[in-house]
Amino acid sequence: MTINYSQLTDTELVDKINQYDKRAFEEVYNRYWLALYNHARRMLKNDDEAADLVQDIFSSVLDKMGTLTFHTTLAAYLFQAIRFRVINIFYREQVKHKYLQSLRAYFDRNEAQADDSIRAKEMTELIEREIAALPPKMREVFELSKKSYLSNKEIAEVVNISEATVKKHLVVALRRLRAGLTSTMLLSVMATLLWLNRVQ
């Protein structure tokens, strides 16, 4: 039976890549190369560097064939990889120093908060659980927006849906997350109150 790789989902393609299926890798390459290149070029302002960076990303995926794992969607994984490598380029070349300073300050501040507060870690885990519970397409759109920082237009191109649909997914996702977090926090408060009543 002939497999139409263009009809396979990203998850199915990743499974086949881990079975050392090079045609699955080629499909991922063809599916995402241009979008990743355009994203890198917008940040680097350099066509050659952007192309080299995207090639490095796919070389890394190829090296991990058989053990490729991540805790997000394939698209979010690839775009996050682009952003991390761009930051490394900026660092090595000592470009955009102020941006890097603010980025370091952001991570330092959040790490300090996580060290000082177990509640912050629990809240992060809670948010990730709520995101994981979203429908697959909605989750992909949400992660591309909030984790990979793509614009609605970029997301529409990557996921092959309209910008209006992207916006709708984001609105519904945020509504679900708020509802889920509010419900969970209320249950937590009620449990604490019940425990306090028992020990009094």
Image (spheres, helix red, strand yellow):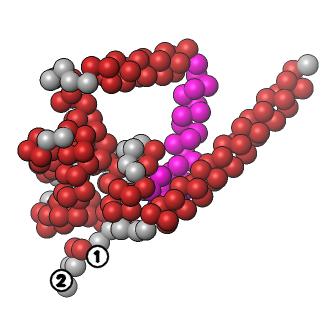
Front residue (pair 136, 80): 80
Label at residue 124: none
Q: 10 Å neighbourhood of mark 2: few (<14), some, or many (≥20)?
A: few
Q: Amino acid at mark 2?
A: Thr
Q: Which quadrant of the view contains residue 40?
A: top left
Tell me which label, 2 or 1, sits earlier in the chain.
2
Residue 135 magenta: yes
- 117 and 150: which is toward the camera: 150
Whether residue 59 can be seen here: no
- Left or right: 23, with 154 as reference point: left
Above or below 103: residue 75: below
Residue 130: image x %, image y %?
57, 48
Q: Quadrant of the C terminus?
A: top right
Q: Secondary structure at mark 2?
A: loop
- Please name the residue that numbered disc 2 is placed on: 2
Measuring from the top left, give residue 43's x and y in whole percent: 25, 40
Principal SS element in the magenta part? helix
Q: Which residue is mark 1?
A: 7
Give the alpha-carbon distance from disc 2 to disc 1, as whole Å: 12 Å
Residue drawn at (43%, 49%) of the image? 145
